[in-house]
Image (cartoon, rainbow, N blue to C red):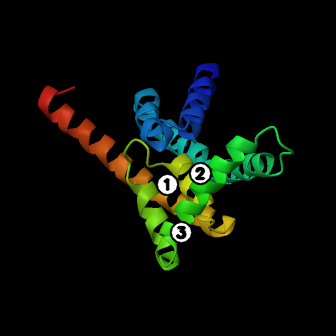
Amino acid sequence: MDNVLLELLLVLLTGFLPVAEIRGAIPLAYYFFRANPFLYVAGLATGLAGNLVVAPVALYLLRFIERVILDDNGRLSSLRKIYVKIVDYARRKAAGHEKMEFAGLLVFVAIPLPGTGAWTGALVAHVLGMRPKDSILSINLGVLGAFIIVLLVVEAGATVLKMIFGV
């Protein structure tokens, strides 16, 4: 039982990590729990929960960091200038495409490739100035999309390997 809890914790943390996210949590859950369907579903749910929590946490951290940079009394003036220049540039480029932000962010997060997950989605949403509620919903729907895609790929890959090698 202790081993199972540790493995579930590892799946949860993998789902939360910026690089791995759901793309790493599902294969890890498969590796740990493939022999027990109940634990496999629990592992999948745990990894998904770890990734769904990213959006609110990341958006909060980004707002906090932005306040520190912008409210600074001089120590970070160079950083503030660079930050304001980058954010202004991004928002100018995105102007006129506000209707596409929600769907675009959802699709961006749903594509299970490196650099396209919930952490990057939260950064994009923050820089574009999207409302937090819209950002969280869009990112989490994208995470669900990535979850489905990665789960299908892992299951299909495992099935093909079983057919080829008879394991």
Which residue is under mark 1? 143
Q: Amino acid at mark 3?
A: Arg
Disc number placed over residue 52 in the picture, else none:
2
Q: Position of residue 131 (x, y in %)?
A: 66, 69
Disc number placed over residue 92 in the picture, else none:
3
Local crowd size for mark 3, using a 10 Å CA cut-off: few (<14), some (14–19), many (≥20): few
* Comparing labels 3 and 1, the label whose residue is closer to the camera: 3
Q: Marks 3 and 1: CB-CB under 8 Å?
A: no
Quote the CA–CA distance across marks 2 and 3.
29 Å
Element type at mark 1? helix
Q: Quadrant of residue 7?
A: top right
Quote the CA–CA distance across marks 1 and 2.
7 Å
Q: Marks 2 and 3: CB-CB under 8 Å?
A: no
Quote the CA–CA distance across marks 3 and 1.
27 Å
The residue under the point 38% across, 48% down is 112
State the quadrant of the N terminus: top right
Element type at mark 3? helix
Q: Which of disc 3 and disc 2 is earlier in sequence? A: 2
* Front residue of this view, candidates 13 and 3: 13
4 sits left or right of 69 in the view: left
Q: Position of residue 17 (x, y in %)?
A: 56, 36
The residue under the point 53% across, 50% down is 118
Judge whether 11 appears above or below 89 on screen. Answer: above
Q: Marks 1 and 2: CB-CB under 8 Å?
A: yes
Local crowd size for mark 1, using a 10 Å CA cut-off: few (<14), some (14–19), many (≥20): many
* Comparing labels 2 and 3, the label whose residue is closer to the camera: 3
* Front residue of this view, candidates 89 and 105: 89
Local crowd size for mark 2, using a 10 Å CA cut-off: few (<14), some (14–19), many (≥20): many
Q: Amino acid at mark 2?
A: Leu
